Image (cartoon, helix red, strand yellow):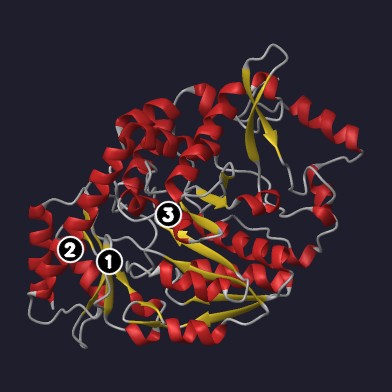
Amino acid sequence: MSVKHRYLPMTDRDRADMLRTIGVDSVEELFRDIPEPIRYRGTLPMSGALDEISLLKHMKQLASRNADTSQYASFLGAGLYDHHVPVVINHMISRSEFYTAYTPYQPEISQGELQAIFEFQSYICELTGMKVANASMYDGATALAEAGALASGATQRKQIVISRAVHPEAREIMRTTARGLNLNVLEVDYADGVTDLEQLKAAVTDDTAAVIVQSPNFFGCIEDLAAIEPIAHSSKALFVVSTNPMSLGLLEAPGKLGADIVVGDAQPLGIHPAFGGPTCGFFAVSEPLMRRMPGRIVGQTVDRDGKRGFVLTLQAREQHIRREKATSNICSNQALLALCASIYLSTMGKEGMREVGSLNLQKSHYAARELAKLEGPSLPFTAPFFNEFVVSLPANANIADLNERLLEAGFIGGLDLGRYYPELQNHMLVAVTEKRTKAEIDEFAARLGELV
């Protein structure tokens, strides 16, 4: 029998054998439960078949329509950032023993993968100032929601107090998780770009399971964690901090400032933005919360000969223990992307992290000063910020139109904050990383000035 499609090696005999085995005469019979009137009998509105050469050309043309950071200078952040990715990372993660590795259930043949995850955990603990970290999460937003769930389980309380300066999409995921767990999510407003501490004090009660803040927050502003910590702990709630790991090369680790849980997204650590993901979340806790962590943990041990080895340990997810006793139903982790972060941190080292953090800080503040000089734009917040800041534009400015015009000039503009905050119409969130040159910043400011 001939094969009709080179990528679908199904012969007529194969098809007949399969139909006979399952007891039907035709493929059409497989759909007999679907009422005839609602079956689609036409031809789907698709282009005709293409040969391989034409298909490759077509796909390249489609790909060329994407505005990527290899062609444009990006000033867009809001959770995904255009940082430098050292070439060694792509070289290492392209090795088949890493990119084909799945779940290391059999430690005796998965020592390399387990050690890579263990190194990631160790780096995250050192970076965040926490005692224990897990093998990674899907992303920073789901890690934050899992932190809220953990806090509720640990305290047996039902209220989550979260700052409106936390990423709006992360807050949405927190609310979605809360509905399933019957939790009450109370949002606290911001003032001058940071969490309003007076509102926070009034919101925290004896039923509060967690106080959740982000620092640097969604506006790029740095929260006063030392002032928030006693507010959270005064009612014995857990203090949860979501953080940008890139900032921790300069800022004090949240764990040193009293955080009980530290979460975040490892994307700034050597992971390409890739048009929105995938990324890798991290999750670290103080020692008393270790057995309540979601996901998995790799532990270090010795074999019967006394040699160092690694195993999965403290498995508290529903795949390993009884469902009603599980801490979470998260099913996997982001091992390959966690490896990116580990390679990045080992490549940069402590001095490198300080240097790249300092470049982010200095370049973003230079950009803010240049934009503030323009006629029209202004900086609405005075709170300290890291590598992201808010720009207020004139009332007649249309940010969607501005970004289209900026794109024509070779720039990916900032985020329109009016999409998430009604009170921040005509406000743009601008991110500046170590990759932006002085010339790019100057031209971006000049173009924006001309357009407004």
Residue drawn 45% across and 86% down?
198
Disc 2 target residue: 365
Mark 3 and mark 2 lie on one chain; the one further toward the N terminus is: 3
Q: Does residue 424 appear in the picture of this structure? A: yes
Name the secondary structure under disc 1.
loop
Mark 3 and mark 1 lie on one chain; the one further toward the N terminus is: 3
In-image side of 389 versus 289 (left or right): left
State yes or no: discs 1 and 2 in contact (Cβ < 8 Å). Answer: yes
Residue drawn 52% across and 30% down?
116
Q: Is residue 418 above or below residue 275?
A: below
Name the secondary structure under disc 3.
loop
Viewer-side residue, 59 vs 247: 247
Q: Which mark is residue 86?
A: none
Quarter of the image for the C terminus: give it.
Answer: bottom left
Residue 96 in picture, x, y percent from top left? 51, 22
Give the residue type at disc 3.
Gly
Residue drawn 34% across and 41% down?
60
Report how far apart the C-alphas of labels 1 and 2 lie in the structure.
8 Å
Name the secondary structure under disc 2.
helix
Disc 3 target residue: 276
Mark 1 and mark 2 lie on one chain; the one further toward the N terminus is: 2
Quarter of the image for the N terminus: give it.
Answer: top right
Local crowd size for mark 2, using a 10 Å CA cut-off: few (<14), some (14–19), many (≥20)? some
In-image side of 29 versus 294 (left or right): right
Local crowd size for mark 1, using a 10 Å CA cut-off: few (<14), some (14–19), many (≥20)? many
Viewer-side residue, 305 vs 375: 305
Name the mark nearer the viewer: 3 or 1. Answer: 1
Q: How many marks?
A: 3
State yes or no: discs 3 and 2 in contact (Cβ < 8 Å). Answer: no
Local crowd size for mark 3, using a 10 Å CA cut-off: few (<14), some (14–19), many (≥20)? few
Disc 1 target residue: 385
Residue 290 in picture, x, y percent from top left? 66, 49
